Amino acid sequence: MRRTLEDFYRDGEPPWDSGITPPELVALVEGPGALRPGQALELGCGTGTNAVYLARHGWRVSAVDLVDRAVRQAREKAAAAGADVTVLCGDATRLDEVGAPGPYDLFFDLSCYCGIPPHRRDAYAAGLTERAAPGARLLMFGYGPGAFDDSWSGVTGDELSARFSGWQLTDVTPGTNPVPTFWFTLQRTADAA
């Protein structure tokens, strides 16, 4: 998977990195009932568009990506924008090795999780759970099963409910892509420790 991602960044603009912050994140940050700024962790940050957006809206942001080239571009983008973003290179399923201790009030994932092989997804969920402040939110965009020609990529609300112990799936909104996609919102239960 890493090599495939590196190839996309080496060859130019990866299709998932549009340079535009999704309206679903904008609504969470600026819309009615907007979250109060706190600490945020973006998983699979790509070139840093959304991390910079969050920092510009008062969030203290850490962002992680597996691909060195994406991390360099995210750091450059943050510096050019004057945004205080800590961009880390590492595996979102091994956050203990990355240097992102938390606690975080918001996690943002724009199709990172759905590209993680199933045998590593429990580690991803455990890493977020360990770093989540009570009441933390996770906003995740994911491709549904069958969106790609493989037997493992994709994500469902049922899977997230099963893997994220101590979290509640509060919303599933279908995406507008030509293949099955969804926006998932999970919230860490306030009494979870």
Image (spheres, rainbow, N blue to C red):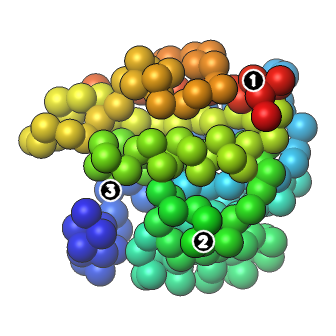
- Tell me the mark number nearer the camera, choosing from 3 and 1: 1
Q: In the rendered image, which quarter contains the C terminus?
A: top right
Q: Mark 3 points at which residue?
A: 15
| Position of residue 74 in the picture relative to residue 189 (left or right) | left
Residue toward you, 16 or 4 = 4
**Residue 97 coordinates in the image, percent (x, y):** 58, 72
Does label 1 or label 2 sit earlier along the sequence? 2
**Residue 104 coordinates in the image, percent (x, y):** 77, 49
**Kind of residue at disc 2:** Val
Mark seen at residue 98: 2
Look at the picture and state if 4 lies above or below 50. below
* Residue 145 in view of the camera: yes
- SS for dot 2: loop
Q: Mark 1 points at which residue?
A: 189
Q: Distance between the residues labelled 1 and 2?
A: 25 Å
How many other residues sit within 10 Å of disc 3, few (<14), some (14-19) or many (≥20)?
few
